[in-house]
Amino acid sequence: MSGLTHLDADGAARMVDVGGKPVTARKATATGRIAMSAEAAAAIRAGAVKKGDVLAVARVAGIMAAKRTSDLIPLCHPLPITRVTLDLALDGTGVAVTANVATDGKTGVEMEALTAVSAALLTVYDMAKALDRTMTIGDVRVVAKSGGRSGDWTADQR
């Protein structure tokens, strides 16, 4: 089982010890998309969804989720998040979400960015499911990170 950071010598799950790591500025960006019918997208744009302002509620859900990531992902460290921003871009067939998360800490914020995107997309689905139950969530991924021992990284453009 050597080489796997979240397993001990006996193969049991463990939280990685980051106690000896230096505090550094860390950032991560994640993206994702929910595809939907043109009618559902138009209703969101018009503010005609009965549950309210879909994009505003999804943005708040994403921010809240980023702050609670360690409560949701069992081996994540609780981190002092210094910034979370969510950009929700509505087009004719769906919503693209981009989350940017930052901290000054001993471990990265990739999981927080992914959790923010996921929660925002799930919230869009929840609020608009009466209009389109066939919506599809996908392409959730980390596209950039900076800070820490491994340095800066950016995903290849698709």
Image: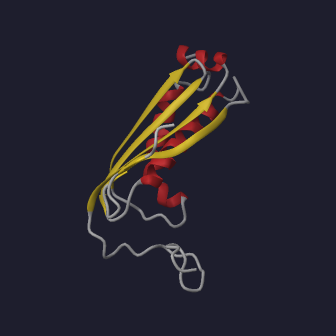
Q: Residue furthest bottom?
A: 10
Q: Residue 16, relative to residue 27: is it above or below?
A: below
Quadrant containing the N terminus in the rendered view? bottom right
Q: Residue at point 48% right, 63% down? A: 76
In the image, residue 17 sits, relative to residue 98, either above or below, namely: below
9 sits left or right of 155 in the view: right
| Residue lying at the far right of the rendered structure | 133
Question: Which coloring applies here?
Answer: secondary structure
Question: Where is 23 relative to 1, above or below?
Answer: above
- Please indicate whether residue 23 sits to the left or right of residue 54 in the image: left
**Residue 118 sits in which quadrant?**
top right
Number of numbered labels in the structure image: 0
Residue sitting at x 45%, y 48%: 113
| Residue nearer the viewer, 101 or 52 | 101
| Whole-percent x, y for residue 4 in the image | 53, 73
The residue under the point 54% across, 28% down is: 95
Residue in front for this viewpoint, 1 or 137: 1
Residue found at x 26% / y 69% = 22
* Residue 130 or residue 100, whichever sits in front: 100
> Relative to 97, is 111 above or below?
below
Q: x, y percentage for residue 30?
A: 46, 44
Residue 134 lies in quadrant: top right
